[in-house]
Image (cartoon, rainbow, N blue to C red):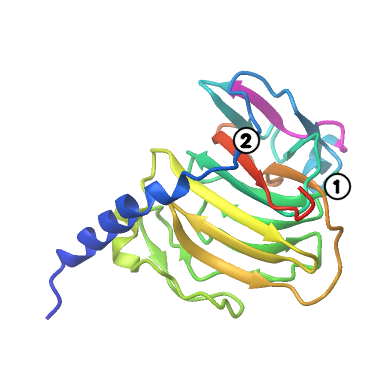
């Protein structure tokens, strides 16, 4: 009979033993912690239909973090870097409410077409699966989903993810620390792209696209999803850093 004490131990070991790997050379800051300099809001996506694409949600800086929410019920959008990136690795810390749908967009266009590292932080959602936002929903691969509570996940996969879930579902509440800052990281290289994602230093997903169907450069964006009423729920991101991987640099 398995001891239940092994599950918390595994979760804490994963959470602690790999945090040091998130610190590496070559990263530069994308966010100064005080302003949205270097970023702009896009209202050109379908998530801004409630405002007739006049506003792209509410994005402010509070306590050293970019904080996003719907500005009116059902109206979201993107905050996107002014600069475009090709091959890169991006990492950030996240402390979102459990409820609003968000995302980390890689090589994003102004109208939100991108390779998305998922931040669907809600019941039925997922973290760091890979989704083709505005690309026909292809791919859509994930190796876990949230149940009704943030502390409970199921390891039933969506699509055919090549990476098995590296965290036991029972260990999830020890590995993922809701209400605290957790690190998310994504890397995209080449075109068709090879995409890898991590949570708190643990590799969650790796995906190789086989078709050329999106530009090789774009912005790095954060999303507040449209639909419903999430005006009183917030997404929060800080310590946003990027490392260029372009061979020419």
Structural crowding at the residue carrying mark 2, measured as other residues with C-alpha within 10 Å and reported as few (<14), some (14–19) or many (≥20): few
Q: For residue 54: magenta?
A: yes
Residue 205, quarter of picture: bottom right
- Residue bearing the label numbered 1: 111
* Residue 222: % across, % down: 67, 42
* Residue 169: % across, % down: 35, 67
* Residue 114: % across, % down: 77, 55
Q: Is residue 58 above or below residue 113?
A: above
Boundaries of the magenta span: 52-61
- Residue bearing the label numbered 2: 28
Q: Residue furthest front?
A: 248
Q: For residue 45: magenta?
A: no
| Of the pair 244 and 126, the residue shown nearer to us | 244
Position of 29 with respect to 11 (left or right) is right
Q: Is residue 56 above or below residue 49?
A: above
Position of 108 with respect to 144 (left or right) is right
């Amino acid at each position: 009979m398995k001891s239940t004490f092994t599950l918390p131990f595994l979760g804490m070991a994963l959470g602690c033993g790999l945090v040091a790997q998130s610190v590496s050379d070559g990263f530069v800051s994308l966010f100064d912690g005080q302003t949205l300099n270097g970023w702009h809001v896009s209202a050109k996506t379908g998530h801004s239909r409630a405002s007739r694409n006049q506003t792209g949600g509410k994005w402010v800086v509070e306590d050293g973090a970019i904080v996003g929410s719907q500005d009116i019920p059902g109206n979201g959008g993107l905050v996107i870097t002014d600069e475009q990136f090709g091959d890169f690795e991006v990492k950030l810390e996240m402390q979102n409410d459990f409820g609003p749908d968000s995302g980390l967009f890689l090589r994003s266009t102004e109208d939100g077409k991108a390779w998305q590292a998922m931040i669907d932080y809600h019941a039925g959602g997922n973290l760091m699966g890979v989704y083709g936002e505005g690309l026909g929903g292809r791919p859509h691969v994930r190796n876990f989903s949230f149940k009704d509570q943030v502390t409970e996940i199921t390891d039933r996969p969506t699509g055919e993810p090549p990476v098995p879930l590296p965290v036991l579902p029972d260990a999830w509440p020890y590995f993922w620390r809701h209400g605290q800052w957790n690190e998310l990281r994504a890397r995209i290289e080449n075109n068709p792209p090879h995409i890898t994602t991590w949570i708190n230093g643990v590799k969650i997903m790796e995906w190789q696209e086989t078709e050329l169907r999106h530009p090789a450069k774009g912005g790095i964006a954060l999303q507040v999803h449209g639909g419903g009423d999430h005006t009183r729920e917030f997404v929060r991101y800080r310590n946003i850093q990027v490392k260029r991987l372009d061979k020419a640099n």
